[in-house]
Image: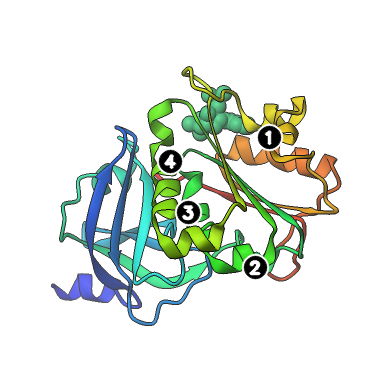
Amino acid sequence: MNQVVEKALRGMVLVKVHNIRHWTDKTFSFSCERPAGLRFRSGEFVMIGLIVDGKPLLRAYSIASPSWDDELEFYSIKVDEGPLTSRLQHMKEGDEIVMRPKSVGTLVHDALIPGKRLFLFATGTGIAPFASTIRDPETYDKFDQVILTHTCRQVEELAFGHDLLARIRADELLSEMVGDKLTHIATTTREDSPAMGRITDWIHDGRLAEAVGGPLDPATDRVMICGSMDMLRDHKAICEDLGFVEGANSEPGHFVIEKAFVD
Ligand code: A2P
C-alpha cells in the first residue's frame, strides 16, 4: 500500500467480504469479518466503502447482522451512477472494503421508552437495521409483540426479508427466542401480491390495526422507521398526529427514524 493511501486510512480497517448475494438487479447483500473490538447495538450503522483515487469513499450502512454475531452483514441498494454502490456491486468474494469501526445510530432500544408492541416500519433496503433488531434477545425481553413491515415496489424485492424470516425459523435458538412474538407483513405497491399497498395506507384505512390486533397507540406502542425521506416524513407525521414523541439516544421517546438511502 502506498503512503498516501496508508495515511488516508488512518482510524480505519480493511476487511474481507464474502457471502455476496445479488437479490435483484437493484439490491445485494454481503458479509465481512467483524473487526476486533467493534461492539455495536442492534440497529446501528457504520461507515464502509472503498478506496477510490487514493481516498476512502465511505457511506453509512446499517449493520444487518445481530450484535452477537461473529461477522457483519450488510444489505445494499445498487445505484448505477452512485459513487460508491456503482463500484461496490462488482465486488468479488475475498475483496476488501474499508470500515471505520465505530457504530452509531438512533434505531436502538436505548432511544425508546418501554412499551408492549414494537413496530418496525421499513421500505426497500430500510429493512437492514431491523434484520439486526429482530435477532436481538433484548427485543423480545422488552416487547410482547414485534411487528416488522416491509414494503417494496416489486415482489422480488421482498426476498431478503422472506429469507431472513426463514433463517430465523430454521434456527433452533432464534426460533425459540422469537416464539410467536414476531409478525412479518410484506407488501408491494407496483406488482400484484397477496398483500398490497403502502403501510401508511394500511395505517389510515385500518388494515394494519386488523392485522396486529389494534391501532397504533402511544400508550403501548413503540416505533422504528427506516426508508426514503418521503416515507420517513409521512410515517413521522402519522406518529406525531397520534401523539407519539420522537426519541433520541439522549432522550428516549415513542418513535425513532433513520434514512435508508446510500448512493
Ligand atoms: P410506491 O410504489 O407507492 O411509491 P422507493 O423505491 O421509492 O423508495 O419506494 C420503496 C417503497 O416505499 C415502494 O413500495 C413505495 O411505494 C413506498 N413508499 C414510497 N414513498 C412512500 C411514502 N411516502 N410513504 C409510504 N411508503 C412509501
Tag 3: amino acid? Ala
- Distance from the alpha carbon under mark 2 to that under mark 4: 24 Å
At 27% from the left and 62% from the top, the residue drawn is 55
In the image, taking residue 159 as reference, residue 14 lies left or right, namely left
Looking at the rendering, the quadrant in which ligand 1 lies is: top right
The CA distance from mark 4 to mark 3 is: 11 Å
Reply above or below: 194 against 9.
Answer: above
Disc 1 versus disc 3: nearer the observer: 1
Q: Which mark is residue 211?
A: 1
Pointer 4 local density, CA inside 10 Å: few below 14, some 14–19, many at least 20: some
The picture places residue 177, in percent across and down from the top left corner, at: 54, 63
Q: Quadrant of residue 208?
A: top right
Residues marked 1 and 4 touching at CB (< 8 Å): no
Labels 1 & 3 near each other (Cβ < 8 A): no
N-terminal of the pair, mark 2 or mark 1, is: 2
Provide residue 202's location: percent of width, then percent of height: 69, 29
Q: Which residue is mark 3?
A: 131
Indicate which disc residue 141 carries: 2
Which residue is identified by label 4? 162
Q: Earlier in the sequence, mark 1 or mark 4?
A: 4
Query: What amino acid is labelled 1 in the image?
Result: Ala
Residue at 49% x, 72% y: name it.
Answer: 40
User: Residue at coordinates 22% horizontally, 58% vertically from top-left?
Assistant: 18
- Closer to us: 76 or 195: 195
Q: Nearer the viewer, residue 156 or 83?
A: 156
Would the CB of label 4 be found within 8 Å of ligand 1? no
Asked where in the image residue 90 lies, by quadrant, the reply is: top left
Badge 4 amino acid: His
| Secondary structure at numbered mark 1 | helix
- Provide residue 108's location: percent of width, then percent of height: 61, 63
